[in-house]
């Protein structure tokens, strides 16, 4: 989708964690289809990445993870986005970067302002990610499933109004 990416950035806006966030949104039919926040250290090394895609994007409806739809009622007309992956460099873990990346996606960027819920798929063995997400306001476990390749997954639903309020308070 590189040809659809337009430049957008917060420039020299540094978060409390010393991280710059840059956005590369992709739009179709007036709606954001995919966006991301990329974090760089002051030495310009990439140290984090977070992405979000519209829940009705074609690639969210194929493959081993499509069973998330069995857990979340996607026919209720709630505006949703799939959130993730969120990746944080080992050198930055525990620094607040995880929250900074979510603040970049949900507060500083307007790409997802019309989205009410985020759906997060986490491998059931990823205790660190499950713990980090559980600290976000408005996060609840919606269910679990096994993918078609028999891997265990946890489906979290994030109330984005609650998460945004919490993340704004952290700025």
Image: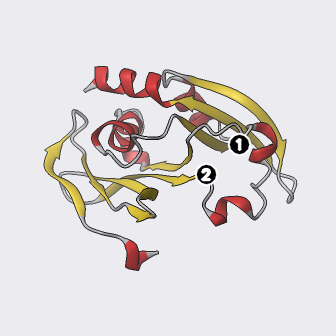
Q: Is residue 125 visible?
A: yes
- Badge 2, how many Cα within 10 Å: few under 14, some, many 20+? many
Q: Residue 121 appears in which quarter of the rendering?
A: top right
171 vs 73, nearest the viewer: 73
Q: Is residue 116 toward the left or the right of residue 40 in the image?
A: right
User: Which residue is rendered at x = 76% and y = 55% of the image?
Assistant: 66
Residue 95 location (% of width, % of height) = 34, 34
Q: Is residue 134 toward the left or the right of residue 114 in the image?
A: right
User: Which residue is rendered at x = 72% and y = 60% of the image?
Assistant: 61
Q: Which residue is mark 1?
A: 74
User: Which residue is rendered at x = 73% and y = 42% of the image?
Assistant: 75
Mark pair 2, 1: CA separation:
8 Å
19 vs 63, nearest the viewer: 63
Label placed on residue 146: none
Q: Which residue is mark 2?
A: 55
Q: Is residue 54 toward the left or the right of residue 14 in the image?
A: right
Q: How many marks?
A: 2
Residue 127 location (% of width, % of height) = 64, 34
Q: Residue 2 appears in which quarter of the rendering?
A: bottom left
86 vs 30, nearest the viewer: 30
Contact check, label 2 and label 1, Cβ < 8 Å? yes
Q: Is residue 124 visible?
A: no
Residue 159 location (% of width, % of height) = 53, 27
Q: Earlier in the sequence, mark 2 or mark 1?
A: 2
Residue 17 location (% of width, % of height) = 25, 36
User: Which residue is rendered at x = 40% and y = 39% of the image?
Assistant: 102
């Amino acid at each position: 989708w590189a040809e659809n990416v337009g430049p957008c950035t917060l420039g020299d806006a540094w978060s409390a964690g010393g991280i710059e966030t840059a956005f590369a949104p992709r739009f179709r039919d007036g709606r954001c289809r995919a966006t991301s926040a990329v974090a760089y250290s002051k030495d310009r090394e990439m140290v984090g990445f977070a992405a979000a895609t519209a829940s009705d994007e074609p690639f969210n409806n194929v493959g081993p993870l499509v069973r998330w739809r069995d857990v979340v009622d996607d026919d209720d007309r709630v505006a949703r986005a799939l959130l993730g992956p969120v990746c944080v460099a080992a050198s930055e873990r525990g620094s607040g970067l995880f929250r900074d990346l979510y603040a970049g996606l949900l507060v500083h960027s307007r790409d997802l302002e019309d989205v009410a819920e985020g759906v997060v798929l986490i491998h059931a063995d990823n205790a660190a990610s499950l713990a980090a997400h559980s600290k976000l306001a408005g996060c609840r476990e919606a269910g679990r499933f096994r993918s078609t390749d028999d891997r265990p997954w946890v489906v979290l639903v994030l109330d984005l109004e609650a998460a945004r309020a919490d993340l704004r308070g952290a700025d």
